[in-house]
Amino acid sequence: MKRLRVPPDLFDAHFAEIHRYIARRLSEDVADDLAAEVFVVALDGGYDPAIGAVRPWLYGIATNLVARHRRTEIRRWRAISRTAGRDRGSHDDPADHEDQVLDRVTAARFTGPLAGALAGLKQRDRDVVLLVALGGLSHAEVGEALRIPPGTVASRLNRARKQLRKALGPINPFKEDLDG
């Protein structure tokens, strides 16, 4: 398979939207690094028009990097959790109190009902939902990004919507958006 050189304006044309997608999935700080990494991967791999349009290809790279980042982060948090009990110092130390407050604030950011509902989805279903909701991709573009047929995208999205509705129940502020 012959790979073509990545178009020179690729970064300028797509960086902002790729960055926005990653920032909505993770955070602004992480998005700065990962969005840049998307284009490093893109430049290293080259673009093959046979795999589809450039935009979904970049979103596919971004989704894979987000997944890798989350796996690494989960391993890190589990390791911290295992050592937290052993490493606790005196509760009289102001630095310990500050760390505990920061830990609680950080944890609170991820404990909302929507985050819990999304976390309850299978990774493949969550990726489809987030590419549609945060990336604004069509079913065909999601299919290209994840290298799955559009019909599979539709069935995964339908299944995920049902699971999210059930998990969120009456506190579903995004009902219209999910029914899109």
Image (spheres, rainbow, N blue to C red):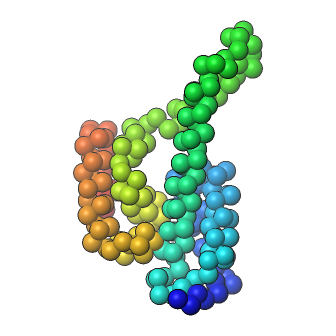
Q: Residue at x 64, y 19 (%)?
A: 86
Horizontal side of residue 135 vs 163, given as left or right: right
Q: Is residue 97 visible?
A: no
Q: Is residue 89 visible?
A: yes
Name which residue lies at 68% across and 11% down.
Answer: 91
Q: Position of residue 52 (x, y in %)?
A: 46, 83
- Percent from the top left, x then y, of residue 5? 64, 87
46 vs 32, nearest the viewer: 46
Q: Nearer the viewer, residue 154 or 168?
A: 154
Write the residue at 70% across / 22% down.
98
Q: Report the residue at 42% width, 58% height from top.
A: 127
Q: Quarter of the image holding residue 47?
A: bottom right
Q: Quadrant of the image for the C terminus?
A: bottom left
Above or below: residue 34 compared with residue 46 = above
Q: Identify which residue, 62 or 20, lies in the foreground.
A: 62
Apparent side of residue 170 relative to residue 59 in the rendered image (left or right): left
Where is residue 77? Give x, y as percent.
Answer: 58, 36
Q: How many marks?
A: 0
Taking 6 as reference, is 53 left or right?
left
